[in-house]
Amino acid sequence: MSKPLLGCIADDFTGATDLATMLVQNGMRAVQIVFVPGPDDPVPDADVLIVALKSRTAPVAQAVAESLVALQWLKDAGCQQYFFKYCSTFDSTPEGNIGPVMDALTAALGCGFALACPAFPANGRSVYQGHLFVGAQLLNESGMQDHPLTPMTDANLVRVLSRQSTGTVGLVAYPTVVQGAAAIRKAMIGLKEQGRQYAIVDAVTNDDLLAIGEAASGHALITGGSGIAMGLPENFRQAGKLPLRDDASALPSVEGHAAILAGSCSRATLFQIAKARGHIPTLELDPLATPDAAALAAQALAWMEGKLGATPVLIAASAPPEQVAALQAKLGRGPAGELVEAAMAAIAEALVARGVRKLVVAGGETSGAVVQRLGIRQLRIGDAIDPGVPWTYAEGTGPGLLLALKSGNFGAPDFFLKAFAMLEG
C-alpha cells in the first residue's frame, strides 16, 4: 500500500469530486473522504486523498475548525503537499469563507504564502487581470449575483480576497503567466518577498494552468478550482514519486435501478431538467406550495411507485430565482435551503431502499445532505461524465452504489441523459 502524495480539502462535496476527476484524468488514484475525518477512519490506498467538507456556507469559525482537523488528518496520513479546493466561481461572502480558511491553513503549515486560481477553462471560467469571468461575462454579471447563499457581486478577486483575509493579496497578471512556469515562479517569489501572503494568478487556457501547476511544485499549499490541479501529477512523476497508471479511474460494476435528484437552482441544472423532462419520468416538487420536508418526500415516494427500473427517473426541487426568492422570503434563507436538503436526503434513502444503485445528485448542498443520510464515508473516483463531474463508487457501505455528485453550475444540457448512457457503453 502506497502513501498518499497529495492531500486536499474541499469546501463542498461536488467540488471535491470535481477536483478528484481532474487528478484521476491525469493518472492519480483518488479517494474522497466524506465529512470531517476521525482518528479511526482508515487511510485508503490512493495517490490523492480529498476531504469533502460542507463548509462553503458554514459559519466562518466552523469552516476554519473543520478545515484544520482535515489538514491534521491528511498530515498524519503522510501527504506531501496540500490543496484547498473552492468553487471556480469563488463562491463566498464578504466575510469568507475562502479567506479565513486560507489564513488558517497557511498558518498551520507555516508556509506564509499561497497562490489562488479558480480558473477552469473547460467550464468557461477564466481569470484575467485578477477578474473572474464566466464565459464572456464578468462573474457579477453571470447569474452568480443571484446565488441564494453566496451572491457574487464583485469580479475582482484581488479585492474579494483582500476583504476576507488578514494577509495582503497580489496579482500575477497574464503577461507574466504566458511566459511560462519560470516567470510565474519568479513573480510569486517576488510577491512573497514584498510581504504578500497570497497571489491571484491569471489563467485563460489549460496551458496556463499547467504552467502554474509546474511553478507551484515546491509549494506546501495550493488553492483554487480543480483546473489548477491538472499540472500537479506531472510534478510528482518528475520527482519519481508517481508511476504511470492506466487504471486510475477503474470502478466496480453495479446492477440496480437508476434515479436523479436535483436540488440545485442554478441555470445549468434548470436547463438539464428541461432537457430530460421529455425523455424520462420527471417529478417537479414545489417547496413553496409544500414547505415541509416530510410531505415533499411523501409526494415523491407515492409518485415513484412502479416507475423504478433501468431507465432513470428524475425528482427535482429546483426552481428559478424568483421562486427561490419567494421561498426564502417565506422561510428565511437558511431554513429554505435546509428544507430542500432534508427532503432530497429522505428521498435518496427511500430510493436506495427500493433498489436504486445508480444515482445522480445535482447541487453541492443537496449532494452533501444525500451522502450524509446514506452514511457514505469514502468515494472512489471514476471517469468523468462532463468536465468536473465523475461517476464514483461508495466504498465501505452496504450495497454497491454508483454516485455522480454534480455541482449545480456544471454539465452540458444533456448531462442527466448521458450519465446513464455512459454506464451502458
Image (tube, rainbow, N blue to C red):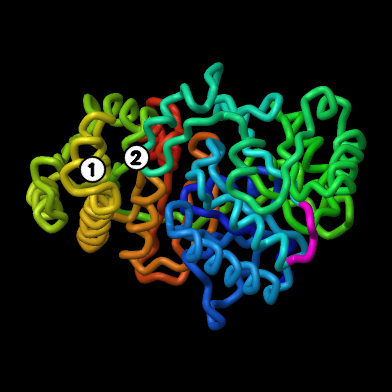
Which quadrant, please, contains the C terminus? Answer: top left
Is 347 placed left or right of 420 in the picture? Answer: left
Query: Hey, what amino acid is under mark 2?
Result: Pro
Residue toward you, 164 or 382: 164
User: In the figure, residue 288 lies in which quadrant?
Assistant: top left
Residue that label 2 marks: 148
Is 55 placed left or right of 336 in the picture? Answer: right
Write the residue at 33% across / 55% down: 357
Q: Which mark is residue 300?
A: none
Query: Hey, what amino acid is under mark 1?
Result: Gln
Is 370 placed left or right of 351 in the picture? Answer: right
Q: Earlier in the sequence, mark 1 or mark 2?
A: 2
Write the residue at 49% across / 26% down: 140
User: In the figure, residue 111 lies in which quadrant?
Assistant: bottom right
Vertical relation: 232 (above or below) 110:
above
**How many C-alpha atoms fall within 10 Å of the one at disc 2: few (<14), some, or many (≥20)?**
some
Which quadrant, please, contains the N terminus? Answer: bottom right
Q: What residue range appears in magenta?
A: 109-113
Write the residue at 13% across / 47% down: 304
User: In the figure, residue 10 lies in which quadrant?
Assistant: bottom right
Q: Secondary structure at mark 2?
A: loop
Is 117 placed left or right of 298 in the picture? Answer: right
Q: Position of residue 398 (x, y in %)?
A: 36, 71
Task: Residue 306: tell me if it is visible.
Answer: no
Vertical relation: 211 (above or below) 235:
above
Q: Secondary structure at mark 1?
A: helix
Q: Is 92 in the magenta?
A: no
Q: Position of residue 59 (x, y in %)?
A: 44, 59
Q: Position of residue 133 (x, y in %)?
A: 58, 25
Residue that label 1 marks: 328
